[in-house]
């Protein structure tokens, strides 16, 4: 009997997880049961994905670059990637700003709702943490991001998943220098990384066998920890604007894909769907990266020379969903708490700061909100109303994080496919012998 495709298994896991979460939320002791016995399954799964992220980036980048034969190709891949990443992010921000200005979700928020949300969340430690994390990041100098990219110690960079850009820097440097020494001398190293790369991609397949159960656990936990539905309803209009914007972004990707690659967008979405479903369930593009790489290479047909660079860089700096959310959230908060600040020039500066903020956001759950603080501060939002502003959107942040992470990952995969096509590196996909299922 033919086994159910992986994406359907994951969808079933998600639906059962949500239902189970609802049942547990209304059962006495249910939340504790989920926290003690169900959540750990999801955490183990995320740990496994993070475990292989650094070795995968190293092996695949070094393999990708050392396969190139000459460095000029790398320059053209790098240049195109960065330009397309910036362009799609600007499109996302403009879509977000246009929608939030037309739909005006802030106008429906009453003083009563503001008071309720403020009393519920303004003292929330997570909000305070995000504000202080933002001020830590803001106090850095303008070139700090360049300094941060260059590690002092390769091993310590590899020991921290937050240092992804440092690992990318080291791997590119090593890969390029492998091209600069005679082939005879680089061969043993190349063989080692080629082999490491194949084995790690197989580890992705093995870990993915656990995905349907893991997403069940992750979503059950999200549901039992969700806020009461009254609060969620009050923010429905704001959340709908973000969701509408994210859907329009998917349409943008589909148009780009069919125009530039002549591939069917539906086929493409189906191929990458397990990565999207994982992004949704984990809210982390970094944790999803190994699966995104596997899907884009083996199921879409993007050559490793392109995907090994474009995807890890994208997971760290290209966040179209996050930037769209930051633009909508910033304007929504201003509509409610500081309407006089909504000038045209402030909106233009939101385009710029949301672009930089999405580049600077870490690819982990909730990171977009930290950088939202910086976006708000950059337009002069009154500091004393900052905590209230975040309190306004906090209740729906997790579901929106799940959705924006899905778009972030979709954007990375789309750009990888377009760049591959532009340098003639988009081939017919070759799915390995057993993949996703034993
Ligand atoms: N969770 C998002 C990601 O990993 C970042 C964010 O918007 O919070 O892509």
Image (cartoon, grey):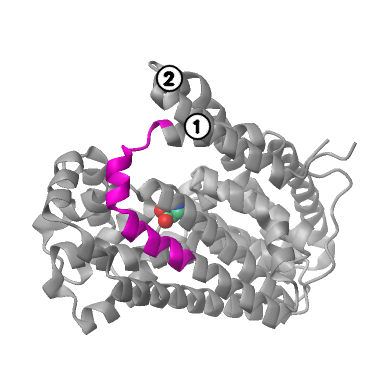
Q: Is residue 361 visible?
A: yes
Q: Give ligand 1's quarter of the image.
A: bottom left
Residue at the location (34% across, 64% down)?
Answer: 326
Q: State which region is magenta.
A: 224-246
Q: On the image, numbered disc 2 is attached to which residue?
A: 30
Tell me the element at label 2.
helix
User: Percent from the top left, x then y, of residue 275?
Assistant: 63, 51
Horizontal side of residue 378 vs 395, given as left or right: left
Horizontal side of residue 61 vs 135, given as left or right: right
Task: Give 219 or 135, whichever is nearer the viewer.
Answer: 219
Horizontal side of residue 304 vs 345, given as left or right: right
Taking the magenta stretch, the answer to whether it contains residue 225 is: yes
User: Percent from the top left, x then y, of residue 424?
Assistant: 78, 79
Which quadrant of the rendered structure holds the C terminus? Answer: top right
Q: Main secondary structure of the magenta part?
A: helix
Task: Give 436 or 75, whichever is nearer the viewer.
Answer: 436
Task: Give 167 or 260, whichever is nearer the viewer.
Answer: 260
């Amino acid at each position: 009997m033919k086994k159910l495709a992986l994406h359907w298994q994951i969808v079933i896991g998600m639906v059962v997880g949500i239902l189970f979460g609802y049942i547990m939320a209304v059962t006495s002791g249910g939340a504790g049961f989920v926290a003690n016995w169900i959540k750990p399954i999801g955490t183990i799964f995320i740990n496994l994905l993070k475990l292989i992220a650094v070795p995968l980036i190293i092996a695949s980048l070094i393999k990708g670059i050392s396969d190139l034969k000459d460095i000029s190709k790398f320059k053209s891949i790098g240049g195109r990637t960065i330009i397309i990443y910036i362009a799609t992010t600007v499109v996302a921000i403009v879509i977000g700003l246009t929608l939030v200005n037309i739909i005006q979700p802030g106008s429906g928020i009453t003083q009563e709702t503001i008071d309720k949300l403020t009393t519920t969340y303004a003292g929330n430690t997570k909000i305070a943490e995000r504000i202080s994390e933002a001020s830590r990041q803001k106090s850095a100098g303008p070139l700090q991001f360049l300094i941060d990219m260059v590690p002092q110690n390769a091993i310590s960079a590899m020991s921290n998943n937050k240092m992804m850009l440092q690992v990318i820097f080291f791997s590119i440097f090593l890969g390029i220098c492998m091209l600069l020494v005679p082939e005879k001398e680089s061969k043993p190293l190349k063989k080692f990384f080629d082999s490491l790369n194949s084995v790690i991609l197989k580890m992705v397949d093995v870990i993915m066998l656990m995905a349907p159960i893991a997403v069940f656990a992750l979503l059950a936990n999200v549901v039992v920890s969700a806020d009461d539905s009254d609060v969620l309803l009050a923010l429905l209009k704001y959340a709908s604007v973000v969701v509408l914007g994210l859907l329009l972004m998917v349409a943008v990707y589909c148009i780009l894909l069919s125009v530039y690659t002549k591939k069917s967008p539906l086929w493409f979405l189906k191929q990458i769907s397990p990565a999207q479903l994982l992004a949704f369930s984990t809210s982390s593009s970094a944790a999803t990266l190994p699966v995104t790489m596997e899907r884009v290479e083996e199921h879409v047909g993007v050559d490793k020379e392109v995907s090994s660079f474009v995807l890890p860089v994208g997971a760290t700096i290209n966040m179209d969903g996050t930037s769209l959310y930051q633009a909508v959230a910033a304007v929504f908060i201003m509509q409610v708490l500081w309407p006089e600040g909504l000038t045209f020039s402030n909106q233009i500066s939101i385009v710029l700061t949301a672009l930089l903020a999405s580049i600077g956001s870490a690819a982990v759950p909730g990171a977009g909100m930290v950088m939202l603080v910086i976006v708000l501060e950059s337009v002069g939002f009154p500091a004393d109303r900052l905590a209230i502003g975040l309190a306004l959107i906090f209740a729906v942040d997790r579901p929106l994080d799940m959705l924006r992470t899905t778009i972030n990952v979709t954007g990375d995969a789309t750009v990888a496919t377009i760049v591959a096509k532009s340098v003639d590196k988009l081939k017919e996909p070759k799915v390995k012998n057993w993949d996703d299922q034993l």
